Image: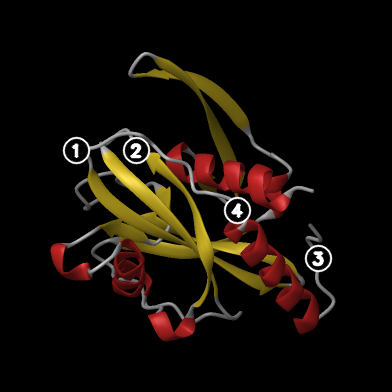
């Protein structure tokens, strides 16, 4: 996919191609049950003529993943109705970007986190610049990282970890002082490989 834009038409074409590629494939079936569900929103914007993804750094006061980089998102509540609604709600609660500001693109794969969550990932687009209002009890900061670093696998290092008897490659990306690793890096690396590469 073209990872640089000369104007609004190029970004519109990029979003449409993402939409087609996501719609043409089935999301991965995890084949697991009994896990608590969470939903995250991968927000993409045209920043400086290139696609960037919106990420957050969690505070040190949250219950899990303290100080780590993540997508906006969180646990699905009983009154959310569906996973997408949960992703929208959590995105607004965490960074102040409401549903009306997000152009829905599609659904990517599901994942299992080491904390025992079944994570559903949705993809949307927002305008740049985007006005963030972080919930300071959960979100320390909000930043944008170039999607190209994940597409090109410009990682700082990798490690092999064993989880439940299976080995996994963990990617570590360093961008402007932010360390992006764990499930967030895994989702972005997979997205770059499965959706963005030709």
In this view, the mark in front (1 or 2): 1
Query: In the figure, residue 125 lies in which quadrant?
Result: bottom right
The residue under the point 31% across, 43% down is 118
Residue pointed to by mark 2: 113
Q: Earlier in the sequence, mark 2 or mark 3?
A: 3
Q: Nearer the viewer, residue 9 or 94?
A: 9
Q: Is there a contact, CB below 8 Å, between mark 2 and mark 4?
A: no
The residue under the point 37% across, 71% down is 95
In this view, the residue farthest toward the bottom is 100
Measured in 3D between alpha carbons, the distance from the residue under mark 2 to the one under mark 4, in whole angstroms, is 25 Å
Q: Can residue 180 be seen by looking at this rendering?
A: no
Q: Nearer the viewer, residue 37 or 54?
A: 37
In this view, the mark in front (2 or 4): 2
Residue pointed to by mark 1: 34
Q: Earlier in the sequence, mark 2 or mark 4?
A: 2
Q: Earlier in the sequence, mark 4 or mark 3?
A: 3
In this view, the mark in front (4 or 3): 3
**Residue 139 pos. (x, y %):** 33, 62
In the image, is 95 to the left or to the right of 76? right
Residue pointed to by mark 3: 4
The residue under the point 19% across, 48% down is 63
């Amino acid at each position: 996919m073209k990872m640089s834009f000369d104007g609004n038409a190029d970004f519109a074409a990029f979003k449409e191609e993402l939409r087609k590629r996501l719609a043409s494939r089935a999301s991965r079936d995890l084949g697991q049950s009994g896990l608590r569900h969470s939903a995250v929103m991968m927000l993409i914007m045209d920043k400086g003529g290139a696609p960037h993804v919106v990420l957050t750094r969690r505070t040190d006061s949250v219950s899990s993943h303290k100080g780590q980089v993540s997508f906006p998102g969180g646990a699905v509540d009983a009154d959310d109705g569906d996973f997408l609604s949960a992703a929208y709600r959590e995105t607004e609660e965490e960074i102040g970007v409401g549903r009306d500001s997000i152009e829905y693109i599609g659904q990517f794969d599901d994942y299992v986190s080491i904390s025992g969550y079944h994570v559903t990932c949705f993809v949307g687009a927002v305008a740049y610049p985007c006005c963030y209002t972080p919930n300071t009890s959960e979100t320390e900061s909000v930043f944008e990282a170039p999607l190209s670093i994940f597409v090109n696998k410009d990682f700082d290092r990798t490690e092999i970890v064993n989880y439940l008897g299976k080995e996994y490659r963990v990617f570590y990306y360093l961008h402007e002082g932010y360390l992006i690793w764990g499930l967030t890096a895994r989702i972005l690396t997979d997205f770059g490989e499965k959706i963005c590469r030709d």
